[in-house]
Image: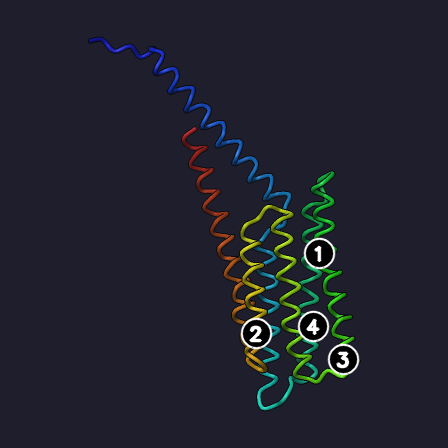
Amino acid sequence: MTDHPDRPGDATDDAGLAAADSLRLIREQQDRARAALGPDGRALYGAWGVAWLAGYLVLWFSAQGREQPEAWAYWVFAGALAAAVVFTMVHTMSRTSGTRGVSARTGAMYGWAWMLGFLTFSAFLGGLARAGADGELMGLASNGGACLVVGLLYLGGAVAFDDRSLFVLGGWILLVAAAATLAGLPLTYLVMAFAGGGGFLVMALVDHLRIVRRRRRAGEGAGRG
């Protein structure tokens, strides 16, 4: 029997393959556009990971043999957090500044949400201090509350930017808030440093590996094309 390379079945198969390739290219273009216009998770996770790891370790070392960390340690910690907040705002707004409409508004609102969240939280702590809260209560409230603000902001960012990794990290940070508060001082600082800061750094690595794998697949697809 003689084969017929141009029979209808072959044409249908070729059309199916062409459609699949077109869908793959569309998905890759959408991924690249989302990566170019949305915040870079590696940068955000890395900034917060370094801030929490360094800041909370300073608090823990300063608290050894004392009831509370020394004043200078709190200033170092506050400076690390402030730097992370400013970096998050600037990075998010700059990555969405070239967009229009909903994307631009989403990036701007998310960036300002960080500043508003921590300004409100600072006022909350000031109210506790004026009400006569002791040092241990202030320590637990400041650390657990910071985790609560960050975790909820990441959950909101996951919805805004359709990012599952942000949702996972937000949930993890909320669990860290509970664990750190239950651990009590000064163990709270170690939990925040390694579970909180370490969690951010792990997510930065995971996000980087995911991007490398995606680029590799895109390169292989372009090579086959």
Task: Kindly report the distance in space between the C-alpha atoms of the residues bearing marks 4 and 2.
Answer: 18 Å
Which residue was labeled with disc 2? 180
Earlier along the polypeptide chain: callout 3 or callout 4? 4
Say which amino acid is labelled 4. Answer: Ala
Q: Do the residues labelled 4 and 2 touch (CB within 8 Å)?
A: no
Earlier along the polypeptide chain: callout 4 or callout 2? 4
Task: Kindly report the distance in space between the C-alpha atoms of the residues bearing marks 1 and 4.
Answer: 17 Å
Point out the image quarter for the C terminus.
top left
The label nearer to you, 3 versus 4, is 3
Residue at the spot 36% in from the left edge and 12% down from the top edge = 8
Query: Could you say which is closer to the camera, residue 29 or residue 131?
Result: 131
Q: How crowded is mark 3: few (under 14 residues within 10 Å), some or many (20 or more)?
A: some
Query: Could you say which is closer to the camera, residue 73 or residue 102?
Result: 102
Say which amino acid is labelled 3. Answer: Ala
Secondary element under disc 4, as helix, strand or loop, is helix
Which residue was labeled with disc 4? 78
Q: How crowded is mark 4: few (under 14 residues within 10 Å), some or many (20 or more)?
A: some
Among all residues in the image, which is located at the extreme bottom?
Answer: 65
Q: Which disc, if any, is residue 129? A: 3
Secondary element under disc 2, as helix, strand or loop, is helix
Say which amino acid is labelled 2. Answer: Ala
Number of numbered discs visible in the structure rendering: 4
Q: Position of residue 67 (x, y in %)?
A: 63, 89
Q: How crowded is mark 2: few (under 14 residues within 10 Å), some or many (20 or more)?
A: many
Task: Kindly report the distance in space between the C-alpha atoms of the residues bearing marks 3 and 4.
Answer: 17 Å
Task: Kindly report the distance in space between the C-alpha atoms of the residues bearing marks 3 and 2.
Answer: 20 Å
Earlier along the polypeptide chain: callout 1 or callout 3? 1
